[in-house]
Structure formats: structure tokens, C-alpha cells
Image: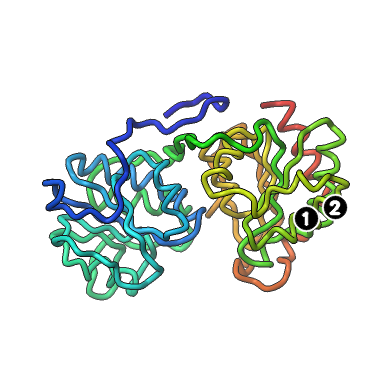
Amino acid sequence: MNKDPAAPHASHARRGPLQQGRSSDEVGRPTAVVLRPLGLGDLLTGVPAIRGIRAAVPDHRLVLATTTALAPLAELVDAVDEVLPARELEPLDWSGPSPELAVDLHGKGPASHAVVAGLHPRRLLTFDSPGHPGPTWYADEHEVRRWCRLVEEGLGVRCDPDALDLAVPAVPPPVAGAAVVHPGAAFPGRRWPPDRFAAVARHLAAAGHDVRITGGPAERELAAAVAELAGLPGEAVLAGRTTSMELAAVVAAARVVVCGDTGVAHLATAYRRPSAVLFGPVSPALWGPPPRPQHVVLWHGDGAGDPWGTALDPALAQVTVSEVVEALDGLLARV
């Protein structure tokens, strides 16, 4: 893996053009199907395990079953040959012969186990659940390490939990060298207040940084509110104006990233960009970035919060603007 944070890229050579939905008889190779149809952070924390599976079955055609929204980003994972569109816990639309190997990187089962078992693979790798023997699931294990351990114990190959890098998208970023402020998160419990993000954005702008507010289409109103509170012009709002690949390109070229416990934090990890990540209901010991000088975690919790909560988590509320600003200033001076 490339260790230069200024020039991130995936560590392995591409295995040829990425295909969608081709069956193993079309390519004359055995197939391995890997199930991971979840969110962006879930996909990115599963990358080391996916690379481990590739190392275990180097001659197989590796098919990643993931959501249609994440399919473009799968092109950035060098170990993947094909993408199979999938929906969470629904049967896969698999028209080819039974795969030689199927791996459940979705959950502890049994519902997700049934999805991969429904392909009738010659070999099936899952965590242990009734009817599906396998390694034991530990609730207090870091997400990256959990899936690496499944692959290590099930396929007898070493996984590198630090193998999180992605290839840089071929599309040019709308902006390079930006200070990326990402105020959104999937659930309110993980969303730091907009006025606090605005205060941080205002500080970064005053320090001379090109501040951009990112987010998905549903977060455009939130991003616009943060920009207005920060005194930033409308063009600073990138939320709803970038594709998933363009967002990845923005993060890959960012000067610094500040966000909550969400997918953009994992993009910053994948591209080794300086980042300050704000945690609340979930412990960074379970979902945080690896211990690198580029990443700073702020957390005051005990891990007992609700990651799907409908109100701001009390632990996240304890994170102050001053400590985020201090962390960012120290990070930018150090990295």
C-alpha cells in the first residue's frame, strides 16, 4: 500500500475492466461472491477483508454484491472484478451457475446468511449461527478487524486491517485542496449541530482555507444552512452537486476533512487525508480510523448510545467547537 498521504492510490494492480452481472461460465473461471449491500462506511471498512478474499482465491472472479448507489465506488477497490446489484437482505438476482465460494460480509445472520446460502455455493463462509457454522461473532470488535478475522479463520489467509486505501477516481474533482466540512450523517443521533459546524467552517475560512460543504442530495438544505451561518458563498456548497465518484475525488484531493461518524470519514481514511472525526453514540474503538497521524478522533462517550437515534446523542453534544478547532489547527500544523 502507498504510504504517501499526498498521493493515495490502491495497492494492487487492476484485474481488468470492471463488469456487472457476468456469470462464471462467460469467463471460464470459478466465482467468489461477496455480500456487502450496506452504506458507504460499511463498504469501505470491508475493503481489507475483500482484499483478503482475493488473496485466498486469486484465480476466482470476485463478484461484490452491493447497492446500486455504491457500485461506482466498487470500481475503486482493486480486488473486485464484477458488481452485482443487491438490496439489503433480499435474494440476489444471480443467473449464473452456483459460485465456488460465497462470503457473507453483511452481518452475523441468520437472515444475511440465507442470502448467500441461497446461491448454493460449494463453499460458504459466514459467522456462526444456527445451521451455519463459522467463527464466533464478537459485538465489541472493530468493524474492520471483525471481517478480517472472518476471512483469516475461514479461508486461512492473512488480512491486513490497514489495507483500506482506494484508487483515486479518474474523474477530476470539482475542487482540489479544499477544507471539507461534512455536516450530515445517516441519523440525527450522529449529527453534530449545524451552528457548530458553521463555526468550524468560519474558522477554517478565516485561516485562508477554501472551505466546501459536502453532502448528498438530501443534505443540500443542511449544507446551505451551514454555509450561510458561516458566511460562505453559495458556491461553497457541494452537497447535492457531486456524484459519488466526484465526492470521493474531492476527499482524495482535500487539504483536511471534518465530519461526524459517517461514510466521508472512511473516505478520508481511504485516501489518508487529514481528518477530524466527531463520535457520539458509537465508540471509535468499533468504527474509528486506524491510528495514524493524519486522523484525530473526538469523543466523550461510553459506547452506550443509539447510533440510529432520532435526537442528538449526549456524548456528541459534549464535543465543543473550541476543541474541534484546536484539533484541526494542530492537525494542519503537524501533517
The answer to whether residue 188 is above or below residue 71 is below
The answer to whether residue 286 is above or below residue 113 is above
| Element under disc 1 | helix
Looking at the rendered image, the quarter that the C terminus falls into is top right
| Residue at (11% x, 46% y) in the render | 28
What's the CA distance linking mark 2 and mark 1?
6 Å
Residue 228's disc is 2
Colouring of the image: rainbow
Q: Is residue 126 left or right of residue 303?
A: left
Q: What amino acid does circle 1 point to?
A: Ala
Give coordinates of residue 264: x percent, y percent: 59, 48
Question: Which of the two residues, 247 or 130, is positioned nearer the viewer here?
Answer: 247
Give coordinates of residue 318: x percent, y percent: 78, 58
Q: Is residue 164 left or right of residue 132?
A: right
Give coordinates of residue 114: x percent, y percent: 27, 72
Query: Where is residue 110, by image quadrant?
Result: bottom left
Q: What amino acid does circle 2 point to?
A: Glu
How dense is the environment of label 1, judged by Cα within 10 Å: few (below 14), some, or many (20 and up)?
many
Question: Which of the two residues, 318 or 232, is positioned nearer the viewer here?
Answer: 232
| Element under disc 2 | helix
Q: Which residue is mark 1?
A: 224
Give coordinates of residue 235: x percent, y percent: 76, 44
How many marks can you see?
2
CB atoms of marks 2 and 1 within 8 Å: yes
Residue 334's disc is none
Looking at the rendered image, the quarter that the N terminus falls into is top left
| Residue at (44% x, 53% y) in the render | 43
Question: Which of the two residues, 34 or 294, is positioned nearer the viewer here?
Answer: 34
Q: Is residue 251 left or right of residue 76?
A: right
Query: Where is residue 78, by image quadrant?
Result: top left
